[in-house]
Amino acid sequence: MSSRVENYLSERKSIGGSLANEWIELESLYQSRLWHELTLRVTSFVHRDELQQGDQLKTF
């Protein structure tokens, strides 16, 4: 698996905040290679208000 993706998810998870549990779930789905479930979760995740601020969606 891509270490770049794993590093990004780990970094986001360590920042904490209101999205920490979401990042943990995304990381778990990625590591388990549950691609369909991950796609569904990411699709709903990007619509969260917290990600609509600044350039967070761009970096995601």
Image: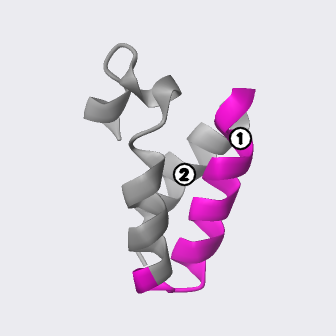
Most common secondary structure along the magenta stretch: helix
Question: In this picture, is 53 found above or below 40?
Answer: above
Instruction: Name which residue lies at 62% across and 50% down.
Output: 23
Q: Nearer the viewer, residue 29 or 5?
A: 29
Viewer-proximal residue, 18 or 1?
Answer: 18
Relative placement, left or right, of 31 versus 35 is right
Q: Quadrant of the N terminus?
A: bottom left
Q: Is residue 15 above or below residue 22?
A: above
Residue 8 appears in view: yes
- Which residue is rendered at x = 60% and y = 85% of the image? 32
Q: Where is residue 60 shown, x and y percent of the image?
A: 35, 41
Is residue 29 a member of the stretch shown in magenta? Answer: yes
Helix, strand or loop under label 1: helix
What amino acid is labelled 2 in the image? Leu
- Eyeballing the image, is 33 above or below 59? below
**Residue holding disc 1:** 20
- Considering every residue shown, the one lying at the far top of the view is 54
| The residue stretch that appears in magenta | 16-36
- Residue 17, image x and y in percent? 72, 26
Mark 2 burial class by Cα count in 10 Å: few <14, some 14-19, many 20+? many
Q: Does residue 60 appear to the left or right of 22 in the view shown?
A: left
Within 10 Å of disc 1 (Cα), the crowding (few <14, some 14-19, many 20+) is: some
Task: Calculate the distance from the C-alpha at mark 2 to the C-alpha at mark 1.
Answer: 10 Å
Name the spot of residue 22 as percent of width and height, x first: 64, 50
Question: How far from the left and from the top, in percent, is residue 3?
Answer: 45, 64
Q: Quadrant of residue 12?
A: top right
Which label number is shown at residue 9?
2
Q: Which mark is first along the chain, 1 or 2?
A: 2
Magenta residue check for 31: yes
| Amino acid marked by disc 1 | Ala
